[in-house]
Each structure stands twice: as structure tokens, then as C-alpha cells.
Amino acid sequence: MGSKPEAPSPTGVARILYKEIVPGDLRKIIAESNDSETGGGARDFRFGEFEKLEPIIRKMFPNTIKEQRRRGGQSVIVDIFRGTFHWNSNEGEEQKTVDFEPPTTARPSEGRITRVHEQPCFAPGRIRKDAGRILLLLVQRNDGSVWPHFIEEQSLSEPGAWDAGVAKELLKCIQARRAANRVVIGYRDFTTGEGYCNDK
């Protein structure tokens, strides 16, 4: 069951989805090999506890397309969630289509953003190697557009660096997961008050 927010909705922000970036994820961005201990399969950002996250994923990736995949050794048709990422570059605002695939038979609890090395908004230079704990933050604005950001934990405590409501939400989940020694993953929908932070 989702919990209610303790702060007003951030200006212009409808909802956020976030996950901690681990070493395996960093290698995916530059299309290097990975191991299952540090992020999962190659070229994907994996989101565990998909069943809990699915409602917010459907809002951020609102177009459903049908693709053929193998499940349980058989070829089946599955629903793929498709959306668009927006980001700013030297050329101005840019955008690119992105797919979020539901769990496989082998990983029944994990959905994933696919082919992350092909997304310019995930360019390696956007993350400092000495940045400490990093979160991937997907921000869906009130107009429906989704903007990915890489966030350094320390920046969440810097006055004015982030909206106070967003920073508070993220820090609360980070602190809870640090105590449990677990990777941070969760969401907050500011339009409905629903939220989730790793089994909390």
C-alpha cells in the first residue's frame, strides 16, 4: 500500500521513479560486460520489485506495444512499455524513444529499461567516478514528459540544489535502505500521494 506524502507537490513535477546506480550499471552505460552481482544483464537498467513499481512505470512509459519474446522456452507475445526521454544538450532540448520491458521467466521480479548505452541522456560523462552514492531519477513533469537525471546523494542536502519535497523523499528512502544494506529503489506520485521505498 502506498504511503502519503509529507510535503506539497513539487512545482511542475507529477511523479518520480528512482533507483540506485551500482558499478554494473555504470559499465552498461559504456557497453562493457557486467556481472549479475553488480547490476544484472548487459545493456539494461534493471528495476527489482516490478509488481510494486508497475503502476508508476505505466504512467511514465504510457504506450504499450506488443513484441515477440521467449518465455519458459516458448515464443510468446508480451506487452512492452514505451515512452520518451527528454534532456537538455548544447543543441537545446532533445528526446529519444525508450522501452521498458516487463520481467522475464528467469528474472520474474525485474523489469528493465533496455539498451541504455544507446540513450544520449545516459552518457558516461554525466556521472563523476568519485561521486559516492548515485541515483537515477526519472522525473515526470505535469505535461507528461519524462526527464532522467543522475543525482549525487550529497547534492540532496545542498540548499536549493533540488526541490525540497523531492530531496526529502529521496533522502528518507536512502537512509532507510542504508540501515538495511540494500540498494535504493522507489517512487512517489505527487498527484495521488502514493509512494514506495523497497518494501516500506
Image: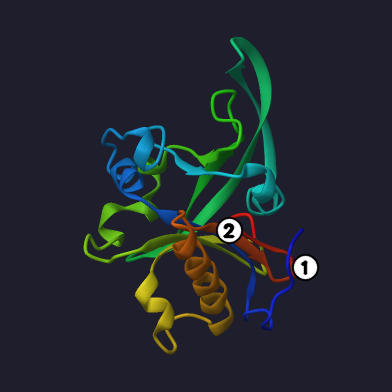
Which residue occupies the extreme left position in the image? Answer: 130
Where is mark 1, residue-wise? 192
Task: Give me the residue at 63% from left, 43% from top.
Answer: 50
Residue 18 picture location, percent across and down: 52, 59
Residue 82, percent from left and from top: 61, 42
Query: Which residue is at the front of the view, 200 or 179?
Result: 179
Label drawn at residue 5? none
Q: For numbered disc 1, what is the local secondary structure?
A: loop
Percent x, y of residue 74:
63, 10
- Which label belongs to residue 186? 2
Q: How crowded is mark 1: few (under 14 residues within 10 Å), some or many (20 or more)?
A: some
Q: What quarter of the picture does the C terminus occupy?
A: bottom right
| Amino acid type of the residue that numbered disc 1 sits on in the rendered structure | Thr
Quadrant of res 81: top right
Q: Which of marks 1 and 2 is nearer the N terminus?
A: 2
In this figure, which colouring scheme has been used for the structure? rainbow
Left or right, residue 41 beside residue 130 = right
Name of the residue lying farthest toward the top: 74
In 3D space, how far apart are the residues under numbered discs 1 and 2 (Cα atoms)? 15 Å
Q: Foreground residue, 177 or 25?
A: 177
At label 2, the amino acid type is: Gly
Mark 2, secondary structure of its residue: strand
Q: Can residue 20 be seen in this view?
A: yes
Q: Are the residues flagged by discs 1 and 2 in contact, CB closer than 8 Å?
A: no
Within the image, what quadrant is residue 108 found in? Answer: top right
Q: Is residue 6 above or below residue 93?
A: below
Q: In this view, does 78 lie above or below 122?
A: above
Locate the N terminus by quadrant.
Answer: bottom right
